[in-house]
Image: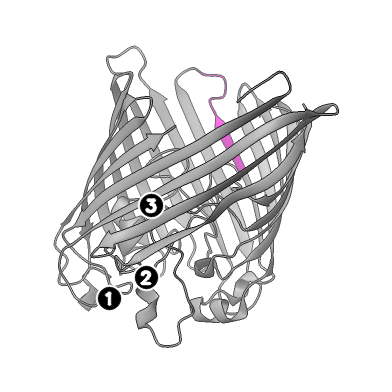
Amino acid sequence: MKNDTSEIKLDIEAIFGVFHSDESYAQLLGTPGSVSWQEGYVKYGFSGSTKAGSGSLFGAINLVTSGTFGDGDAAGFTTGDETETDFEDLYVGWRNEMFEISAGSQNITIGDGFLVNGDALNFGKGFEAIPGAPDMDRGGAYWLAARKAFKKSLMLKLGGDSGFRGDLFWLESDNPSQASMELAGLNVEHVSDHGTVGAYFLKGLDVDATEAAFLGYTHRDGQRTAGVRFQGSMGIENLFLSAEYASQDQGDNTRLDGDAWYMEAGWTFSNIAWSPSLNYRYSQFDTGFDPLFFGFNRGYGTWFQGEVAANYAGPFNSDTGVHHIALKATPMETLTVGALFFDFNGESNSNLDATELDLFAEWVVNDHLILSPVLGFYNPKKSAAQGGTQLGGADTSTYFQLLTIVPF
């Protein structure tokens, strides 16, 4: 519904996925063998805006219904017995050409999601088997990350689409898997045709004491993280460059201070059939580095590195160095195919060293249907019995998922 001054939109997003892993992983599971499960969620509600003074008032209200079914995921974070309906986005704000302020439950991303990309970790009932564990169930849909909004937030944005701009924000998670962390941050950046240069500072303000003690996250109360980043083409057509460096001072002595960084370069061969692109990235995470709220951002591999490694086996963007090669092509305007290779090498502990190859496709069937299959091959150096996480042996595991995405 739209007129000269106002607009209200019905927002519906539905994703359903089927998953299979030949092997299980000793995060919360103790029995080897294959697992098959399904995940799904529907996000539904309204968003809109209306003219107000020299700018516009905007907001959204929607809910998410999510669930996991079948065996539960390959790490045991979900059991297949999770369903939940709750509010997701619930915010209001005001903006003009150079200023925006918003408050409520909303998704917040800094840069390409290296450290902050929504509150997207969605555990289920797997922790119930651990005596004394807090309630970690967020409604399942672990891989799909059905819930991404921070429960409470205040975001102030200054500047336009180019030149200098900045973000000042406060957020509070109600996610037990993140110890319900409270965080404040400042992000400043300069946007030009050559790329975006940015710098940020994050300060942990509080955690839930029970959840933090259980997860080993007490350091997040008082934690300080500062970083710089760049992403762009330097004005050269077909070139892609991206890099980031973050230094982290933990809030107490329960975890080592640590740094993390990555450098990535890519080239698109636009004059060749299918316009293939080839990217190489190296990322490094110190032993004590806490990756905070990283998440899926600019496609498979960012920042969940390896479908098996990043979701089930580990490492989870800490205590590792990762070589990554990505080859992607576009046979048709509506079809993208790709191959992603990852080589994980531990910093202080080699138990999670592994290689992984993921093959994927993204097919836009029509305006309301997208299909995305993924076939993965994960090869750990060590089994769970040798200090790794793969139960029953260190043979190469085959992993498959198929996502059906229905946007409106």
Say if mark 3 contacts mark 2, CB within 8 Å: no
> Does the rendering let one see residue 139?
yes
> Which residue is denoted by mark 1 in the rendering?
387
Q: Residues within 10 Å of mark 1 (few under 14, many from 20)?
A: few
Disc on res. 322: 3
Q: Position of residue 6 (x, y in %)?
A: 70, 26
Residue nearest the observer in this picture, 263 or 164: 164
248 up-or-down from 237: above or below: below
State the SS at label 2.
loop
Q: Is residue 340 above or below residue 130?
A: above
Report the amino acid beneath label 3.
Val
The x, y position of residue 199, in whole percent, is 68, 45
For the C terminus, which image quadrant? top left
State which tag comes first along the sequence, 3 or 2: 3
Nearer the observer, 57 or 163: 57
Q: Mark 1 or mark 2: which comes first in sequence? A: 2
Where is residue 313 drawn, in percent x and y?
A: 30, 63
| x 59%, y 42%: residue | 111
User: Magenta residues?
Assistant: 229-236
Residue at left offset 52%, top offset 19%: 236
Query: Would residue 119 appear left or right of 250 to someone viewing this image?
Result: left
Instruction: State if disc 3 and disc 1 touch (CB < 8 Å).
Output: no
As measured in the structure, the alpha-carbon distance from the residue carrying label 1 to the one carrying label 3 is 19 Å
The residue lying toward the viewer, choosing from 123 and 298, is: 123
